[in-house]
Every structure is written in structure tokens, then in C-alpha cells.
Amino acid sequence: MSCTGCTGQLDDTNSLKCNACDSRYCLECWNFGSHNKTSDLDPNLLSTLKCPSCTNISRRRRGKNIPAILSPSYVTRTATSTQVTIESISALLDQKLAPTSSIMIYSRNVLIQEVKGLITTDIDKLVNGLREEFTKTTDHIMEEVKELNKIIKEKENIIKTLKTEQILFENKLQIISSRFVTIEKLSRDRNIEIQGVPEDRSENVISLFRTLCNTFKYPISDRDIQACRRVAKMDGKSKRPRNVVVTLSSPRMRDEIISATYRFNKEHGDINLNSQHLGISGETNQIYVCEHLAPDTKQLFATVRRFAKNNSYAYSWVKFGQIYLCKSDKTNAILVKNEVLKTLK
């Protein structure tokens, strides 16, 4: 090994180690003289030795009998020795500033700890700020959610109330509709409707109706005819003539005229009641005499007739404003309403 100060060769008998940095110097560099040995030195003195890099206090200023390290020696040195000492100092500085030196390791550790402390402090401040901001945001969101839940519950209660009222109104509407249908039937219970009578601008519908009654020998007087007129078509595009509606003096008379029409058609077989029986010249039109139905009932009866034809029902008819179906002579009649057709086959 070599001396850190003069780079001379060393052994355990002529060298001492710094107690702070473990650097080793010869006895001459420690100013103990080259004639001494380490075994001759005071152990207490050796336990406090520090090199120039570890202390800047001289032996005299501290007032202790410790040699002034690297102070001018009474030993005669040559120019070569002085030059070697400067180089050794440079080497010593390089050694102390080396990345693996104890001083650099210690300084590095201290710097790392300080940087960690600063970073930790800044991160803690940032995290605490974010936590406070996040807490405020979540609190605001929760308040809005509570307010929305409150509004939703209020709207749900309103919806429940409206649904209850809707059910009540629907029930009332059904009752009113039923009463209206009944009233409409009663208002038409003295009316008969004559379909298929050809139109003429100079016609007299009352005379046509009298002729009709005379055809199947039903006596009718002027006072029995309350009103007689043609009514508008339900389908404006239809080429059929407008129907004739006659208001009679009683529902019984209406039923008697309709029954007389059925008997006439039954008695005459293939030659049913037509425009020739009314004395109308030109193309022969089949004439039908039936009850004066409300528009909804009339549409339903048209649907029932198509259903009866497509599903092999023998009879479909109207009596007192009610529509009936019958499969054959051996089956019972079925009262038809809108929802009944869905269940029939």
C-alpha cells in the first residue's frame, strides 16, 4: 500500500489511519518523524487522529499535544519530495471526491433524504389539496343527487295520481259512452233505413216509401210518417245511391215493416224486393229495409258479415240495435261486440 500524502510505500509499523475517513499516511506525513514506530505512540493520541480533509483545526489552536498534521517538518525535504506532496494532495482530493468515497456517499444520502422530504411535502400538499377539492365536488354532486331524487319522487307521486285519475276518467268515459250509445239507439228506434233506392232529382221519397209499403201490403198513413229524407254517404267515393231514412210514429211500426219485408222476400223466392217494385225504371237494384244503425254499429255489422262469409257462419243479423251471429240452425246465436270477433273461429 502507499501513503495518501507522499505516495510512499507503507506497512503497519510506519503508518497510521485517519479515524474519520480510513485514509492511511506515513509517520513523517503525520509529523511524528521517521525514526518513531506506531507501537511507540500513545494509544489515546492515535484514537483521535484525523487527516487534513477531515479537520481544519490545528493542534496548537485546540491546545492538545497532537501533531500538526502535514505541517512543515524539520526533516529536510528535496524539491522532488515537495512536488510529490502536491501531487499526493491532488490524488487525495480525487479520492475524497470519488463517487465511492464515504464523504460522497454520505453527502449523496443526505441529499437524497432532503429531496425525498421536499418531494413528500409537496406531494402531500398536492394530495391534500386534491382531496379537499374532490371532497367538495363529491359533496356538491351528492347534494344534486339528493335534490334530483326528491324531484323524481315528487314526479312519481304525480304520475301515480294521474294514473289513478286516468283510470277513473276511463271508467267514467265507458259509462258515458254506454249511455250515449243507449241514447243514440233510443233516438233511432223509430227509424228504418232503405238502401239501394235509385236517386232522381224530381223524386218524392215519401211517395216512394208509400209505394214500398203497398208492395208488401202494409197500410201506412201520412201521420205515421214523421220524417222521410235521404242521408249523406259514409263513404263519399261510393257510387251507391244515398240511403233513405224514415222516422215512424212508433218502434212497433218499424219492426212490423221490417218483418213484412222479410216475409215478402221469403214468399217471392229469387225475386226479392227491388227498384222495379217501386215503379222505378232503368237498371234493377236490390232494395234492403233494415234498422237505422249508428255509424259505429254499421261498420261493425259490415265486419261481421265479412267474418261470417269467410268462416262459414250461416246467419248474421241485427235486432234492436244488437248484432248476432249463428253458425247453423242447430247452434245458439252469438251477441257480437268488437272484442268478441277475436275469440271466434
Image (cartoon, rainbow, N blue to C red):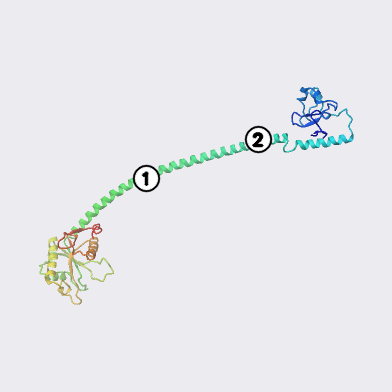
18 left or right of 214 in image: right
Residue at figure coordinates x 46%, y 42% from the top left: 144
The one nearer the camera, 233 or 312, is: 312
Mark 1 Cα shell of 10 Å, populated few (<14), some (14-19), many (≥20): few
The one nearer the camera, 152 or 310, is: 310
Image quarter (top left, top right, bottom left or bottom right) of the C terminus = bottom left
- Horizontal and vertical percent for residue 202? 20, 74
- Horizontal and vertical percent for residue 311? 23, 64
User: How many marks can you see?
Assistant: 2
Which residue has dot 2 on it? 113
The one nearer the camera, 249 or 289, is: 289
Q: Quadrant of residue 342?
A: bottom left
**Judging from the image, what secondary structure is the residue with disc 2 in?**
helix
Real-space CA distance between mark 1 and mark 2, rounded to the nearest whole angstrom: 62 Å
62 lies above or below 196: above
- Horizontal and vertical percent for residue 255? 13, 62
Q: Residue furthest bottom?
A: 282
The amino acid type of the residue labelled 1 equals Glu
Image quarter (top left, top right, bottom left or bottom right) of the N terminus = top right
Which residue has dot 1 on it? 156
Residue at figure coordinates x 86%, y 36% from the top left: 83
Q: Quadrant of residue 107?
A: top right
- Label located before the other in sequence (1 or 2): 2
89 lies above or below 175: above
Kindly report which numbered mark, 1 or 2, lies closer to the viewer in this rendering.
Answer: 2
The one nearer the camera, 299 or 266, is: 266
Residue at figure coordinates x 28%, y 50% from the top left: 169
Residue at figure coordinates x 48%, y 42% from the top left: 141
The amino acid type of the residue labelled 2 equals Gln
